Structures are given as structure tokens and as C-alpha cells.
Image (cartoon, grey):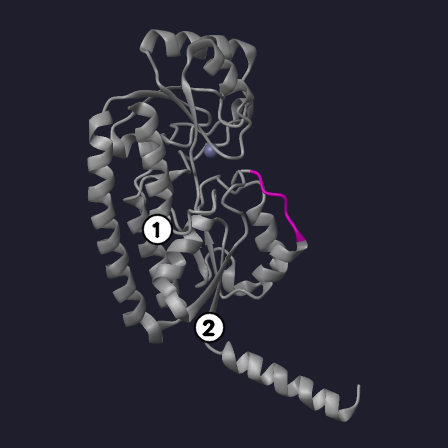
Amino acid sequence: MTTKKLSITVLFLSIFSFANAGIIKVVTTTMDTKSIAEFIGADKITATSIATGYQNPHFVDPKPSYIINLTNADMFVTVGLDLETGWSPQLLASSRNTKIQKGAAGYVDASVGVNLLQVPTSLNRGEGDIHIYGNPHYWLDPLNGKQIARNICDGLNRISPANKAFFEANLVKFDATLDLKMKEWASKMAPFKGSKIIAYHNEWVYFETRFGLQIVDFMEPKPGIPPTPSQLVKIINEVKTNHIKAIISSPYFTTSSSDVVKQQTGVKVCTMATSVGAFDTIKTYFDLFDYDINLITAALK
Ligand SMILES: [Zn+2]
């Protein structure tokens, strides 16, 4: 490289690093915590999510690019429990980034302080159960978004105390926006309180509890175990007996078994969004519930 070229490169790199100076690099495991981090951190952060919004967050194939992102990160946000057990601890270890390891200032477990549901009394991964510490799909109760935002805000305060007032002000705005949206969602869902539905995977208990739905059974006989013929027979009977109008599924599950139930009973199969980015229109944590509530209320009418 000539001296001229080298100095241009150095100049470019200096401008680049100057432009990014002080910007906090956040890596999240999922798109939902990314969306909330972007609300709280705003222009003080850049955030990337490892999983896409249409991927099953229990099963993500590790890629080298994920490790590079983690190596350069200032903060890491995990949903926690055993949601990402199969992939994120290995990625985190491979990054060798001491700033974001468990216990470090840049490590945020978004589940801290969340009122967990379905916490088993004994740890048993029998038959492939992947919810051994309690149900990890807690972000699907919109009000749990407040605790997630609190945890992310605490993490940002730890690593950038100079911006604490800015993050705290954004947290107040986030909570206020959520409260306003919650009123709208609750009134849309109110006519359907007590409606019985079937879910594909046991990932809707927080949504169900918040909005007063009643999930009668799951297409999966156990979390993580695909539907079996005997489970399908059981579901068909339950749909007929309880006059169930909808099976709710997710973009990463095949609808073939739900379609069998549909053909036999006329039940509607709703592919709900479980994360921001599941579908193109879902850009934020608020969009997620707008989408799902419009879909489920149309199916239950
Ligand atoms: Zn799950």
C-alpha cells in the first residue's frame, strides 16, 4: 500500500471510529428485546438481534458472524430461562468478550423480576421438555415489556452512567406508550374473554393469562415434541366438544397437522407473530400485539 493510500485509509478509519465514538453496541438474542433496547437507548446505541423474528428462538443455528458481533458488543441481552439454552451460552463463551459474560456489567437477563408462569416444582427434562425453569415466552404478555425495559435500562445505566437521565426518561415514555396501547388491546380482546383455543407450542400462556383466553390443549404433546397421530385425534375431539374456533401457531411451525384438524372440524388456523419481525409490518414491540390481536379477534368473531 502506498503512503498516500495508507493515510487515506487511516483517515477514513479515524472518521468512522469518531462517528461511532460513544455509541453503545448492543446484541440481543431476539428481536423483541432489540426493539425495546432501541426505544430505551435510542441514538446512544446500535442494536442487533441474533435470532430473526420468524425463527424458533429455541433453535438457532450458530454462525461465525454472531460471534463477531458478540466480540464487539458492549451489552448482551438474553431472554433467559431455557429459551436460548441450545445456542446462546456457546456463542457467548466463544466471543471471549469479558464485558458481556454472565455477571459482567454488560450482561442483561431480561427475565429478572418477571412474574414467571408454569415454574415446575422439580427439574425434569423428560421427553425433551424445553421449559424446565418455567415458561420462557414471557414477552408475549405486553405488560411484561415494562420489566424487560427496566432490566435493559438498568444495563445501559451500568455501562453508560453519564446517560442515565436520558435512558430513564425513555423508560418513562416506553411505559406510558405501553399503558396507552394496553387500554386499546384490552378493549379489543374484552368480548372474547373465556374463549377456548388450541395452541401449537406452549408459548402463549402469558398472552392467554393477560387477555383471559383459555388454551385447552397443544398440538405438541410436550414442548418441543412434534404432534403425534394420537395427539391429533385428541385435539380433533377437543375442538368438536368445546366448539373451538381457532388454533394459534407460529411462523416457524408447519401447519400440516393443524390443517388436518381444520379439515376435520372447520377450525381456523392462525399463524400468530411471536416476535417483532415475524412479518414485514411488525417493526416494534407495539406492532407485535397490534398484529396478533387483530388476527385472533377476527378468528374468534
Ligand atoms: Zn417454548
Q: Earlier in the sequence, mark 2 or mark 1?
A: 2
The reply to whether the magenta stretch includes residue 62 is yes
Looking at the image, residue 70 lies above or below residue 282: below
Judge the density around disc 1: few (<14), some (14-19), many (≥20) Cα neighbours within 10 Å.
many
Secondary element at tag 1: helix
Range covered by the magenta-colored residues: 59-63
Q: Is the CB of the residue bearing disc 2 within 8 angstroms of ligand 1?
A: no
Secondary element at tag 2: loop
Q: Name the residue at the right extreme.
A: 1
In the rendered view of the protein, which quadrant contains the C terminus? top left
Disc 2: which residue? 23
- Residue at image position (34%, 7%) is 241
Disc 1: which residue? 148
Judge the density around disc 2: few (<14), some (14-19), many (≥20) Cα neighbours within 10 Å.
some
What's the distance in space between the residues labelled 2 and 1, CA to CA? 21 Å
The reply to whether the magenta stretch includes residue 119 is no
The kind of residue tagged 1 is: Ile
The image shows residue 130 at horizontal and vertical percentages of 50, 31
